Structures are given as structure tokens and as C-alpha cells.
Image: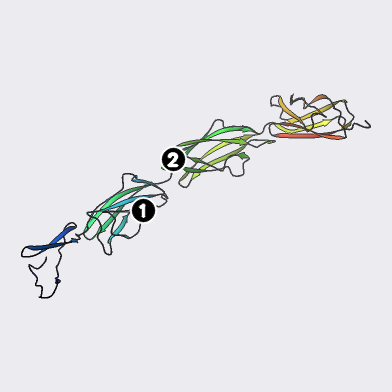
């Protein structure tokens, strides 16, 4: 509102006058024109309208579902750009538990009719639908966000239910549902001699993962049960695996003569202590110096006979050489030594 006219005193180049503004629904550009006879001039001024909150939305680029411990943005939309001054304050509140947001925010000039607010999701045990309310004056608008609990293992399965020493099996852990981000599953077998990874990670959207478990048991008089547990913060699953004796309790390597000369034929006794009900056992043989004491790669021993004799011919070392001879089967090892002395050569 401007006066209909103003007086300019003689000798003055101009004058000032006051005007008052109303509250238009939107920002408008007001042009004031001054005329004096055939002469006219004009000037303009922006009158800022009332800023109202029109909506509260979740941007299309984001999802209305958010993972526990994750975050999502909501957007407060205004009817017009924010005017100059102290800005526009909007109050925020939450109905339900599952997210953390500020109590209020201030939209400053230049926000171009919108303002994004970061919503932090809490860790939840069950899915939680949270209603967020933004209020400015008498205007209130809401947006819903669903905080998803973390997935948890519902099943552990293995390709076999029993393992002998040194044997492996493939174990599969299955989650109850795909998740919005990678899921780490912790694995544990307590004190049981079962070699497994400490954890496995399922990529976003995956529901199962397979890993290897290897038994380290040998020499048992009876089987033991290893309880394998897979867990996330929201649940767990277990699997019982029977760890059984390999049947092999002891191996020995005994040269009948422990100090010999070069190019000597001698016998070596490979001993086996095992359960009588196991099948013949393939025993791997290894020499620390095959050029001095060569050994066959393996021998087969019937547990009912308890040993086998093998015959070898020593080589011709340049100096006295002590060779370690090792036998191994099903996680059990035994060894002996043999010294070859070339004498005065």
C-alpha cells in the first residue's frame, strides 16, 4: 500500500515515503510508478509471501525401507523459495520407535522450496513402521519410513552329518530373507576341533552362503558332537556335526638299522595302530632327503597286521647325513631317523 501522492518541496531533488505490505500467498514483484505531468519513473520491490509447508515426502531416489543402523532422507516441500531473513523453522516429531531425527530444522534463503532431512535408523528387533511429522504453524504433513530388522539364519545344513579326521564338508547358512545391505554372519563351534571361518558375509540381496568345515579330530575312542552356531544380532541357527575317530591312532617309522653306509639295502618297518574294523589304510611316506633315503609315495597297511616292511637302498652322500622319514594318514603322523655315513671316501 502506497500513498496516492507525495509532495516534493521546492529546491529538493526528491522525497521519501513509507509503504506497508500485506501477506501475499506467494512472492510478488511490486512496481511503484511516480508521475508528474508528462514525466514518469518507476521502481520495484519484492514482497515476500507467506511460506507454507506443502508436503513431507521420501524422494523417489530413496526407498521407504531402511536397514537397521542405516539412514534415509525425507524432503520438506514449501510453496515457494525461502525469503531473506532468519529462515523458516519447522518442527519435527516421530510416532513410534526406530529412528532418530532432530526436533526441528531451519530452512534458509535459497533452499529452492525444499529441504532434505537425514533420518538415522536405530537397531530394531522387529520391523518398525515410523511416522515422521513436520509442522509449521497450522500446517502439518507426515511421511512413513519402515525400519527393517536385520536378517537372521534360519537353517544350517551340511553335505554330511559325520566327519573323520582331516575330512571336510560344505556347510550352507540360509537367512530368513534378503536384506538391504551386506549381512555378516558369525560362526562358532566352541572348543570342538572343527576348522571353520570366524564369519561369512552375505552380499546385499543374498539369502544363502556356503563355506567349508574341516575336522581335526584323531585318536578318539568314541565320536564327539560339534555344535556349529551361525548368528546375527537378531537370531541364530545351529547344526550338529559328529566328529568321529579316523580309526588310526598311531603311526611309526622304524629302520631296522639306524646307521648305515652308502648304497645299502635295508628294511624299514612302518607300524600302524588302528581300530580293527577300519578298512586298509593308505599311509603316505616322505623322506627329508630322497636322494639319500628314497621312499615310495605310499603304502597300504591292513590294520589286522599292524605293520608292513619296506625295502630301500640308500644313496651316496658326500658327508654323514641324517634323514627324517615320515608316515602320515588321516591326520596322524609318525616319524623316525636314519643316518647314512659315507665313511672314508
Nearer to me, 215 or 205:
205
- Tell me the residue that label 2 is attached to: 204
**Left or right: where does residue 286 sit relative to residue 132?**
right
Q: Toward which corner of the image does residue 341 lie, by quadrant? A: top right
Secondary-structure class at tag 1:
strand
Nearer to me, 179 or 303:
179
Residue 96 visible (yes or no): no
The image position of residue 103, as x and y in percent, is: 33, 60
**Left or right: where does residue 44 sit relative to residue 118?**
left
Of marks 1 and 2, which one's residue comes earlier in the chain? 1
The image position of residue 219, as x and y in percent, is: 70, 36
In the rendered view, how is the structure colored?
rainbow
**Dividing the image into 4 quarters, which one contains the C terminus?**
top right
Residue 151, compared with residue 276, is above or below; it is below
The image position of residue 134, as x and y in percent, is: 28, 56
- Tell me the residue that label 1 is attached to: 118
The image position of residue 164, as x and y in percent, is: 64, 32
Residue 168, compared with residue 146, is above or below; it is above
Q: Toward which corner of the image does residue 83 lie, by quadrant? A: bottom left
Mark 1 or 2: in front is 1
**Left or right: where does residue 56 sit relative to residue 193?**
left
Give the residue at x 61% y 39%: 195
Give the residue at x 15% y 60%: 30
Secondary-structure class at tag 2:
loop
Alpha-carbon span between mark 1 and mark 2: 22 Å
Residue at the limit of the structure toward the right, as seen here = 344
Are there few (<14), some (14-19), or many (20+) residues within 10 Å of tag 1? few
Q: Tell me how many marks there are.
A: 2
**Dividing the image into 4 quarters, which one contains the N terminus?**
bottom left
Amino acid at each position: 500500500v502506497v500513498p496516492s501522492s507525495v509532495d516534493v518541496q521546492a529546491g529538493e531533488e526528491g522525497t521519501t515515503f513509507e509503504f506497508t505490505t500485506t501477506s501475499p500467498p506467494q512472492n510478488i514483484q511490486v512496481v511503484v510508478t511516480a508521475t508528474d505531468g508528462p514525466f514518469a519513473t518507476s521502481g520495484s520491490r519484492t514482497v515476500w509471501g507467506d511460506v507454507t509447508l506443502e508436503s513431507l515426502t521420501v524422494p523417489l531416489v530413496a526407498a521407504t525401507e531402511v536397514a537397521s543402523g542405516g539412514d534415509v532422507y525425507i524432503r520438506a516441500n514449501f510453496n515457494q523459495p525461502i525469503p531473506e531473513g532468519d529462515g523458516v523453522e519447522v518442527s519435527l516429531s516421530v510416532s513410534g520407535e526406530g529412528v532418530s531425527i532432530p526436533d526441528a530444522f531451519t530452512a534458509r534463503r535459497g533452499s529452492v522450496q525444499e529441504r532434505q532431512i537425514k533420518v538415522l535408523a536405530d537397531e530394531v528387533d522387529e520391523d518398525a513402521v515410523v511416522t515422521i511429522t513436520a509442522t509449521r504453524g497450522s500446517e502439518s504433513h507426515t511421511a512413513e519410513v519402515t525400519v527393517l530388522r536385520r536378517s537372521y539364519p534360519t537353517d544350517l545344513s551340511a553335505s554330511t552329518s559325520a566327519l573323520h579326521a582331516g575330512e571336510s564338508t560344505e556347510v550352507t547358512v540360509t537367512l530368513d530373507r534378503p536384506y538391504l545391505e551386506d549381512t555378516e554372519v558369525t560362526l562358532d563351534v566352541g572348543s570342538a576341533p572343527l576348522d571353520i571361518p570366524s564369519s561369512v558375509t552375505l552380499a546385499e540381496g543374498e539369502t544363502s552362503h556356503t563355506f567349508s568345515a574341516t575336522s581335526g579330530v584323531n585318536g578318539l575312542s568314541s565320536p564327539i558332537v560339534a555344535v556349529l552356531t551361525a548368528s546375527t544380532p537378531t537370531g541364530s541357527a545351529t547344526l550338529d556335526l559328529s566328529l568321529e575317530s579316523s580309526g588310526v591312532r598311531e603311526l611309526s617309522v622304524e629302520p631296522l638299522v639306524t646307521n648305515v653306509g652308502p648304497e645299502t639295502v635295508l628294511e624299514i618297518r612302518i607300524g600302524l595302530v588302528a581300530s580293527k574294523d577300519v578298512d586298509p589304510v593308505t599311509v603316505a611316506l616322505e623322506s627329508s632327503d630322497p636322494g639319500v633315503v628314497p621312499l615310495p609315495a605310499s603304502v597300504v597297511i591292513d590294520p589286522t597286521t599292524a605293520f608292513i616292511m619296506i625295502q630301500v637302498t640308500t644313496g651316496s652322500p658326500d658327508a654323514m647325513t641324517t634323514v627324517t622319514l615320515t608316515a602320515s594318514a588321516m591326520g596322524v603322523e609318525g616319524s623316525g631317523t636314519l643316518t647314512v655315513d659315507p665313511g672314508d671316501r
